Image: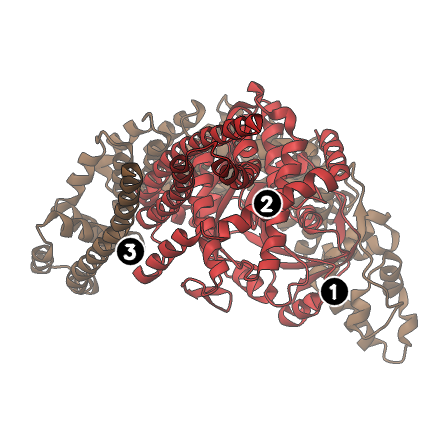
Chain colours: A brown, B red
Amino acid sequence: MIFLLVCAVALAAQLAVIVAHRLYQRRLDAFAARVRGEITGPLVDLLASEVTASARDAFLAHIPSDSRARAVVADLLLETMPKLRGSARDELAELFDEAGFTAQYLHGLSSSQAWRRAVAAQALGNLGARRAAGDLLNLLADPAPDVRLAAARALGKLGMPEVIEPLIQAYTRGALAYGPVATSILRIGHAAGLPLMDYLHHPEPEVRALAARLLGVLDVFEAGPSLVEALSDEDARMRTAAAGSIGRLGIENAALPLMRALSDDRAEVRLAAVAALGQGEDHSVAGVLRLALSDEVYEVRRAAADALVALGAPGIAELIGVLSDGEEMARAHAVEALERSGHADQMLQRWLEAQPGVPLAAAGEFLRALAAAGGQAPFEAAGVSLDGSGMPVRRVPADDHWPSQLAGVAEE
Amino acid sequence: MQMLRGLLLAYDYAVAGYLLLVCLVYFVLLVLATGEMMRHRRWMPSSGQDDLFASPLAPSITVVVSAYNQRGSIERCVRALLNLRYPTYAVVVVNDGSSDDTLDLLQRRFDLRPLDAVYPEYIPTAHVRGIYVSRTEPSLTVVDKEHGGRADALNCGINLARADLVCNIDASSVLEPDALLRVAQPFMDQPEQVVATGGILRIANGARIERGSVTRVSLPRNPLAMFQVIEYLRAFLIRHASWSRMNGLLATSGAFGLFQRRLVLEVGGYHPGNGGEDAELVMRIHRYQREQQRAYRVLFVAEPICWTEVPETLPALSVRRRRWQRALAEILIAYRPLLLRPQYGVFGLLAYPYYLFVELLGPVIEATACITIPLAVLMSALDVGFAVALVLLALGYSLFLTFSALALDEFGYRRSPSLRDLLRLSLYGAMEGLGYRQLAVFWRLQGLWQAIWRGRDDQLKMAGRDLGAA
């Protein structure tokens, strides 16, 4: 009986704790709203006009001394910081520093609790506190993976190319994964470009591939020749990344090496090369892309069709050519690409407008070619009824298996 | 008679032992779930979701929606998906041979035009009748196929997906705008390890949904839906959170899961013909990754929210519960070689036995105890006080877990509505043991019965396919 009574009391207490927490939280929320309300006005005034010494002093005078209220203000400033650019951001960071918040977070980096170290790292990153770089670099060797992650993110936000080497080292020793390292380096911005070029010759292939990919994303045109050279790298990840970046950068004179990459034995390289050719300005590649419509891998064929569309008139011409004399699978991809891009509808419309007296049922080579390939949508768009059956959907044989062909891409 | 009394007494003591063991197991799970909640609460400020949103390296996602006779909810679901906050994603809606006007509705609302597309059939599916793209929403593709079931529809979407990750979602669900960002974050942070993640499901009955977004959160008025709110809270905040921490999660949330597309294709996609496709797929992924000796993680992420509607009538709820239990039984039977095999790590040694002895056989013990305990008391084989204490312990512990789930929600996630609603939830938690729980046990028993006696052929087929896929 006593046991049951104890249990009942325990359950009631449990419920009481939940309710009490809700009531306490309400008070906290009201308190935070009040503090935010008090500081938001002066903050807006400060950021809206030129920051003078007196305006700074006036703002600093509004910062409360109570630790709970200071925490609310710190949160507000940290939320505001990423939304600001240029001098306003620097001004706010200085104010944050003067109010003693930066020192507080720097102290937090050596906390015994991992989550406090991570929160401090995150805050210092948002503040762009470059003087914290050394401490943040030390955190790349922190035993807690999430702290390393937060430190990497923060280092990226400092915008210092000097942190690239430690980040790469953390990546090669497995302390950080590809995603966080790559994102952090990207956050550094264009200043990371030239230092990254050195890593195109790094002994570790995953580092070379990382550098090649980031150089493309960062628009480092100076890396063009090195990336073209990297198309013949021994590692498929590097070749793939190089092809992707060449396409993104639109490197001139890269068409020939990219066309050679279309015969690479790895599907992911061919896929990246096809996409890169479609992004380029060289229209002479249309014929080669047309050949890629017969690649053994579905994804490469589809990318080739998309690339031909992206090339514009020469690519469209090749796709139309495929309709009349290509093999069945290439024709199917051509039809899909023309329809997906809207070109099929446009061309048919134009053709019909140009031939007003021609009966629709005998609408020339273009229509017949599309009909042979099973394309129905252009006919529907023109109000031409065929047999009324459902859309013909072609199936790719099951042995054309993507994952086994592209295992390397996902590994990256 | 003496022998019968002895047997009853022995069985009831065994039930008491089982109950204590289950209480202990749940206590451990609760401790782990609390740890996970604390972790979430502390680490949330440094989770870096805005970084992911801004990153050109964010993994691409194809969201696959399976829709079968969903004319009532499909537009709302698709609109919510088209408004997600994520840098690179596409939506593929698979109309699984609906007999209502789901497809017509989609065609009208999203201005679809047919596309003579090539369909890469990496995973065999029922016949695809047509593929459509939207003139107004470039990221939307709709597939019309013959009816093949939810698994078949998801496989169809996975075949057409081109992204790194595939997210499955039911047409009756609505995702919160940041849901994809949050559920994809682990793939960015630990790309070599994380193979699947799942978010939390919350019940949309009672909430106001406008143009694909939940604009007001409140609890349902229907008592059955209220009981399910409590069940979902317990399931996700205690069971999913704790097993995720141990990497022994059996299922991502059925209506909202994110998977590496490459891996899903490698293991052969969803298995049709089984009500628990998601759990079966996750089980297969566990086995496959362990057999390949690859480090991997299947994670539950508590913050991304998927709003879903639950049945509000007894017949509809009973069908769902029977299906779940039947699916669980079929999966556990098909994957019985994993049981207590050290090769399968935490999953084989802890998670599988838990699902077998607690989740699958629990209703059997509970139902038989409902008969044997009163019988033993009537036959004076069992002390009345002991019997009452046993029953109260079972009900009280269940209530303790309910309050614990509410506490986890309150302290960690703060998603429960008003204080009044919190008290309503507590009240329903207290009333759960007075009829609803017994009904649920009855339905689960029925599901188990169906799995054992009616589903033998299915199990054999499933096991055969499974071996083939491996």
For the C terminus of chain A, the quadrant is: top right
Q: Any mark on residue B56, and which?
A: none
Mark 2 — residue? B444
Left of A367 or right of it: where is B390?
left
| Residue B78, image x, y percentages | 58, 62
Query: In the rendered view, would you say B313 is above or below B454?
Result: below
Label 2 environment density (alpha carbons within 10 Å; few <14, some 14–19, many ≥20) = many
Q: Are marks 3 and 1 in contact (CB under 8 Å)?
A: no
| Residue type at tag 3 | Leu
Label 1 environment density (alpha carbons within 10 Å; few <14, some 14–19, many ≥20) = few
Instruction: Give the CA separation, mark 2 to mark 1.
Output: 30 Å
Q: Tag 3's secondary structure?
A: loop
| Residue type at tag 2 | Arg
Mark 3 — residue? A84
Q: Nearer the viewer, residue B137 or A188?
A: B137
| Residue B230, image x, y percentages | 44, 51
Please, which chain is the residue tagged with disc 2 on?
A: B
Mark 1 — residue? B99
| Residue B415, image x, y percentages | 37, 54
Q: In the image, what residue occupies the spot 36% across and 34% down? A: B31
Q: In the image, what residue occupies the spot 35% across and 47% down? A: B403
Q: Nearer the viewer, mark 2 or mark 1?
A: 2
Label 3 environment density (alpha carbons within 10 Å; few <14, some 14–19, many ≥20) = few
